[in-house]
Amino acid sequence: MATLTQSYLVKTLPEALNAIGSWRFSAGQTVVDPDLFPAIEGVLRISNKYNFLDIAAAMKETLARFLVGSPEALFRLLARLNRTLRGSLSDPVWRYQPPTFLKFAHNHRIPALLPGIYYLILSVYDPNELAQTQEVPAVDKIRCLTGFPGLYAQLTSGNDLLKEGEGRNRVFWNFVSLSREDQQKIWDSLPGLFRLGTWEDLKRGVVSTAVS
Amino acid sequence: MLQDPVEPPAPASPRPVYDWSKYHTFPESSLIPEGPGVFKLVVNGPAHSSYTFNFDWPTFVRQSSTFASILKGGDAALGQFIIASDGTQVVQVNGDNPKDWSVFIRAIYTPL
């Protein structure tokens, strides 16, 4: 008798989300378990179609907390990105990931993920490269680039040592070196800098249309 | 002799026959005990493959307004409640990927 299995099921969802970036799947060139997002999307499809409201809400809450919806999750991903890249400006495998997260957040209407994903995008693309890439939709690009100057200033404390074309995305990796208090301060400011509204709005599923 | 006109009994609609041996069963179905209050969900998969899952009524009625309606005989657009010839209570759904249901069973019956 045929059966279908998902390897991610050996872990709980938070464990699987926490593991993102901790290894590479060389064949698929990804830092995410290839079974993870199809499984999450499967649960969300069934939940949404048949109105399993509590299950859908619990999934979205877990995703928001453990994927990239908290300073701790952002710290974890940036620390792994930093360790993996080891001085190189960027990496196609890591570049691929934030746009994938972005598509997922849009498809399943989880706007609370957007500020963290935008921060990750600015961590893997210099603004000049971001402006040209086709991987990120235009409205998200505009929001990212709108937030760039304010974040860049916070992260460099006004000491701008890097010039255009020098991989200003690396400045965003400094998040991991900041104190918890400063990390939280930056985290709190993200929705406003990206013109997304407030954290409260995003958690309620509402996105500001100031940029749309 | 006059008799009251009595309408002849309507022939009972035949209950569908399911040959359960032809259905794939997901291992996750074992999370739900057999017995009263259990129904079978039938999902038609790709290439004419069909899958069954055992589910318990209380969980589905409590968690899903859509299934609450289906199990009362309504909401045929999304699923149809059927009593099979062997007495098995069945909900037949169409258009779903059996893999989605496989992971969904985990999500609903085990902690996330």
Image (tube, rainbow, N blue to C red):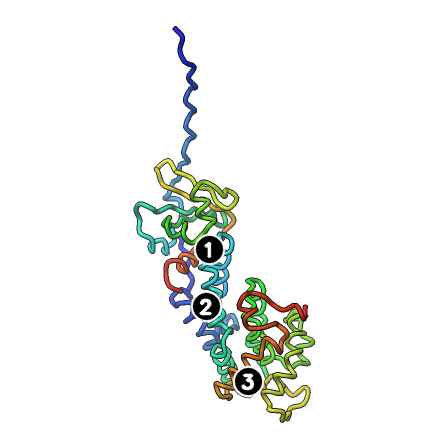
**Closer to the camera in the image, B63 or A8:** B63
Q: Secondary structure at mark 1?
A: loop
Q: Quadrant of the C terminus of chain A?
A: bottom right
Dots 3, 1 in contact, CB < 8 A? no
Residue A72: where, in percent of width, then height?
47, 79
- Are discs 2 and 3 both within one chain? yes
The residue where tag 3 is placed is A173
Within the image, what quadrant is residue B109 found in?
bottom left
Residue A16: where, in percent of width, then height?
43, 70
Within the image, what quadrant is residue A169 found in?
bottom right
Q: Is residue A62 above or below residue B68?
A: below
Residue A12: where, in percent of width, then height?
39, 67
- Are discs 1 and 2 both within one chain? yes
10 Å neighbourhood of mark 1: few (<14), some, or many (≥20)? many
Residue at x 50% of width, y 79% of height:
A71
Q: Is residue A161 above or below residue A120?
A: below
Q: Nearer the viewer, mark 2 or mark 3?
A: 2
- Give the side of residue A118 with respect to residue A22, left or right: right
Q: Nearer the viewer, mark 3 or mark 1?
A: 1
The residue where tag 2 is placed is A62
10 Å neighbourhood of mark 2: few (<14), some, or many (≥20)? some
Q: What amino acid type is highlighted by mark number 2? A: Thr
- Are discs 3 and 1 both within one chain? yes
The residue where tag 1 is placed is A52
Q: Secondary structure at mark 3?
A: helix
N-terminal-most mark, 3 or 1:
1
N-terminal-most mark, 1 or 2:
1
Output the chain of dot 2: A
